[in-house]
Image (tube, helix red, strand yellow):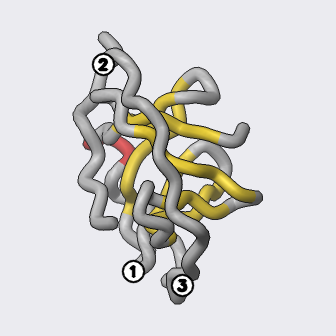
Amino acid sequence: MDWLYTKNGVPLRVRDDKVFAQSGKQIGRIRDDRVYGPAGQYMGTIVDDERLIYRSTHAARVSSPFTPSFAVGTVRAHRVAAARWGDEPRIDG
């Protein structure tokens, strides 16, 4: 998996267990099928190996905090929004 897309189609680059915004800033880390932000807060669940969707029923889980890293910024076209249960995750990047 090299790319994830949010529910509304915003592209996110994936390298190993790290998730990067288009700016190149690491915004999350993958643990199982969930993505957690730098403070360890739940950001979203990976659905169908391609979409990151915020699901309030999963929000109680937390992970250990980490220091964000940086990668080269990227440009990629947005995708069409997904008609799946959940909300657009909050991306700070």
Q: Identify the mark nearer the N-term, 3 or 2.
A: 3
> Front-most of 8 and 83?
8
Residue bearing mark 3: 66
User: From the viewer's perspective, is the residue at label 2 or at label 1 nearer?
Assistant: 2
Q: Which mark is residue 39?
A: 1
Q: Identify the mark nearer the N-term, 2 or 1.
A: 1
Residue 12 x/y as whole percent: 49, 47
Left or right, 84 with reference to 1 = left
The three-letter code of the residue at mark 2 reads: Ala
Quarter of the rendering occupied by the C terminus? bottom left
Q: Which mark is residue 90?
A: none
Cα gap from disc 2 to disc 1, whole angstroms: 27 Å
Residue bearing mark 2: 81
Q: Looking at this view, name the residue that lies furthest to the front.
A: 75
The residue that appears at 54% across and 84% down in the rendered structure is 66
Image height of 17 relative to 67, above or below: above
The three-letter code of the residue at mark 3 reads: Phe
| Quarter of image, res 70 | bottom right
Q: Identify the mark nearer the N-term, 1 or 3.
A: 1
